[in-house]
Amino acid sequence: MYIENVGEYLKENGIKPSIQRIKIFQYLLDHHTHPTVDDIFRNLSGEIPTLSKTTVYNTLNIFVKSDIVQEIIIEE
């Protein structure tokens, strides 16, 4: 999926486009490996020093509730 303006896409789906939300969504678009919260946090925390794992969890939950991403649960 290619989205030219992530901020506008989030707005169109009823999500306030904060820098953290934009960066997390862009990360998901760029990485099709089903990243974990830890993967996302580890890769973006250097770029966004104020990012926390709680923010990543909350943002992903917002994306799931808005049906712009799909949660994959893998049980071992």
Image: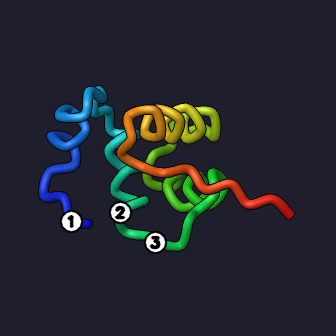
Q: Is residue 23 left or right of residue 2?
A: right
Name the spot of residue 57 as percent of width and height, x first: 59, 38
Q: Which sits in the foreground, 61 or 38?
A: 61
Q: Is residue 33 left or right of residue 18?
A: right
Instruction: Tell me how far mark 2 sits from mark 3, CA to CA.
Output: 7 Å
Which residue type does callout 1 highlight?
Tyr
Q: State the mark number for residue 30.
A: none
Q: Residues within 10 Å of mark 2 (few under 14, many from 20)?
A: some
Q: Which sits in the foreground, 42 or 35?
A: 35
Q: Quadrant of the C terminus?
A: bottom right
Check disc 1 and report its element: helix, strand or loop. loop
Name the spot of residue 14 as percent of width and height, x first: 26, 27
Which residue type does callout 3 highlight?
His
Q: Residue at (54%, 61%) from the top-left corner?
A: 43
Q: Is residue 36 left or right of residue 19?
A: right
Name the spot of residue 53 as percent of width and height, x first: 63, 40
Q: Residue at (14%, 51%) from the top-left corner?
A: 5
The quarter holding residue 72 reads bottom right
Q: Residue at (49%, 55%) from the top-left corner?
A: 44
Instruction: Tell me how far mark 1 sits from mark 3, CA to CA.
Output: 12 Å
Q: Quadrant of the N terminus?
A: bottom left
Q: Residues within 10 Å of mark 1 (few under 14, many from 20)?
A: few
Q: State the mark number for residue 32.
A: 3
Q: Is residue 72 above or below residue 30?
A: above
Q: Is residue 4 above or below residue 14?
A: below
- Disc 1 marks which residue? 2
Q: Do residues under tags 2 and 1 come within 8 Å of each other at their CB atoms?
A: yes
- Disc 2 marks which residue? 29
